[in-house]
Amino acid sequence: MQSEIIISGFGGQGTLYAGQVYAYAAMDEGLHVTWIPSYGPEMRGGTANCTVVISDDEIGSPTALHPRAVIALNLPSLDKYEPLVAPGGYLIVNESMVNREPTRTDIHWVMVPANTIARELGNERAANMVLLGALEGNMKALPEGAVERALEAHTAKRLQKFVPMNIEALRRGAEFKA
Amino acid sequence: MALELIKGNEAVAETALRVGLVSYFGYPITPQTELLEYLSARMPELGRAFVQAESELGAVNMVYGAACTGLRTMTSSSSPGISLMQEGISYMAGTEVPAVVVNVVRGGPGLGNIAPSQADYTQIVHGGGHGEYHLIVLAPASVQEAVDLTGLAFDLAEKYRMVVCLLMDGFLGQMMEPVELPEFKPVNLSAPSWAIGSENKDKKVILTSININPPAQEIFNVKMMTRWQEVEKNEVRYKGYYLEDAEYVVVGYGTAGRIALTSVRAAREKGIKIGLLRPITLAPYPVDVLNDLADKAKGFLVVEMNNGQMLDDVTSIVAKRAPIHFYGRMGGMVPYPDEISTAIEEMINSEPDVNRDARGVWLAKMRELVGTGA
C-alpha cells in the first residue's frame, strides 16, 4: 500500500515541516518514506510545497501527478491541486485562507479553519499541525497516534515545550471529517 | 541501528566524514550547496580541513594537491561548476591520484537552472576533460544508496588510484529518506607508498601528469587502459527488478530509474511482463546483463532526464537485436510515472522494428508536448 501526500502553501506556513513530521512518523512505524520539497525558483517566489510518499515497499517515484492526499494551506494551492487529487483521495483545505469550497464529488474533502483553531490554542503557527491532524484523522495511513509520537520523538529539546500544543492541534484537526 | 531522516546532500557529507574524509575543497552552487555547508560546520569540529575556494578551478586544484598525499579528499559541485573542474579532473587522472567528485546535476546547458537533470551523463561517463581517461561513475537512486556509494567511492578511488564521480541530481540532493549511516571509522593519516608524505624515504616521489616523451605517455596510457579493464571486470553494479520473466525491459538510472520503477509495477499489475534494469555503475556500464537481456527481450525502453545520452550506449550494446524506445525530459523537467506508463504502452502496441529511430520519434512527440518556442 502506498500513499502520496502533497502539502502546499505560502512559505512560512510550515508546509515543509508538516511533511517532515509525517515522514518521521512513517519512518518510526517501519515504513518506507520519501520527503521532497519544492526548492526551485517557485520557492523563492513565496510558495512552498512538499511531497511525502509512504509505502510498505521500496518507493519508486518520490513525486506523483495524482496524489492520494493534498493539504491546501492557501487558495493558489487549492486551485492547483484540487483537480489533481486521485479519485477517492483526500483534500484538506485551510478554510482560513481560501474563499471557496472544493467542487469535486469523487474525493473526500473537508474545510478546516486551521488558523482560527491554532490561534485559539495560542499560536497561529500551529495551523499546519491542525491540518496534518485532519489529514491523518481521515486518511488513517499510519497506526493510531503515530504522528503524535513522532512529534514527541523528533522535536528538538529547546522546542519540546511546544509539543503539547502541537499535539492538541493535531487532535482538534482530526475532529473534522471529510 | 537507528534510522535517520536526512537529505541526500547532507547524507553524502556525513558519510564522507564517517569513512574518514581528511580534506574537502569546494564552492557553493545549488542544488548541491547543503553538502558544502554541512561540511563547513562538521569538518572544523573534527579538526579536519575544509576550504571554500575562490572558485571551482581553485577547489579542484586544491583537491589535486591533497590527492597527491593519498589521503581521503573530495569536492562537490553542480553541472556548471563541474564543467569548470574538468581540467583538474583530467590532470588527476593523468597523475593517477584518488579523489571523489560529487556532481549534483542540474538543468542545462549553460547556467541553466537548479532543477534535477541527468544531462551530464555524456560529460561524466564518456570523458569531459581532455585526453583519454575513465572515471568510475556511481549513480545512486535513493539517499541510502547515496550513502552506500559514498563509502564505496572512496574505497574504489584508492584501490584503482582513480577519480570516482558520484553522479546525483537535484532530487537526490534535496530529498529526505530514512538511512542507516555507517559507523565512524578512524581517519587514516598514513600516506601510501606512491604518495607525497610517504614513510618510504628511499624513493623519490614524483607525481605529475606531464609526459613530454610520447612513447612514455603511450606506456602510461596502456597501463591506465589495463587498469580500466580490471575495473570493468570487477566493479559493475546494477539492480534488476522483475527481470526473470520480462519480455520488455525498461532501462533507467538514478532518479529516472526509480520513477520508472513505479511505472513498471503499474504495468505488471496489468499483466504486462516487464522489468527494470537500473545501472548503478554507469562506468563501468553493466554491459553483460544488458547483452543477455538483448537476446530475449521483445523491446527496450530507455528512460532518462536528458536527450537520450545513455540511449546511445544501450543502442550500441543491444545492436539491433530488439527494438529500442526512448522517453526523456530535458532542461530540469522530471517525468511523472504516468508519462513513462504511456511510453510503455506505446512500446507494447507498436510494430517491432529494430531499425526504428527512437530519438526521432520521441523528439517529434516532445515538439507536440512542449512546443519549440517558435
Image: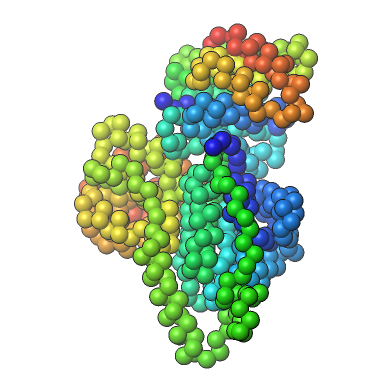
With B203 as the anchor, is B364 left or right in this view? Answer: left
Residue A36 in view here = no
Q: In which quarter of the image is residue B311?
A: bottom left
Q: Residue at left 34%, top 43%?
A: B241
Q: Where's residue A10, x and y in %?
A: 69, 29
Closer to the camera, B101 or A70? B101
Q: Residue at left 49%, top 66%?
A: B159
Q: Where's residue A47, x and y in %?
A: 67, 33
Residue A167 in view here = yes
Q: Residue at left 26%, top 49%?
A: B299
Q: Where's residue B248, x and y in %?
A: 27, 45
Closer to the camera, A112 or A146? A146
Residue A78 vertical position relative to residue B200 in the rendered view, above or below: above
Residue A19 vertical position relative to residue B207 in the rendered view, above or below: above
Colour theme: rainbow
Q: Where's residue B267, x and y in %?
A: 31, 35
Closer to the camera, A109 or B132? B132
Residue B183 vertical position relative to residue B68 in the rendered view, above or below: above
Total numbered labels placed on residues in the image: 0
Residue B5 vertical position relative to residue B77 in the rendered view, above or below: above
Which quadrant is home to the N terminus of chain B? Answer: top right
Q: Quadrant of residue B25?
A: bottom right
Q: Residue at left 58%, top 61%?
A: B101
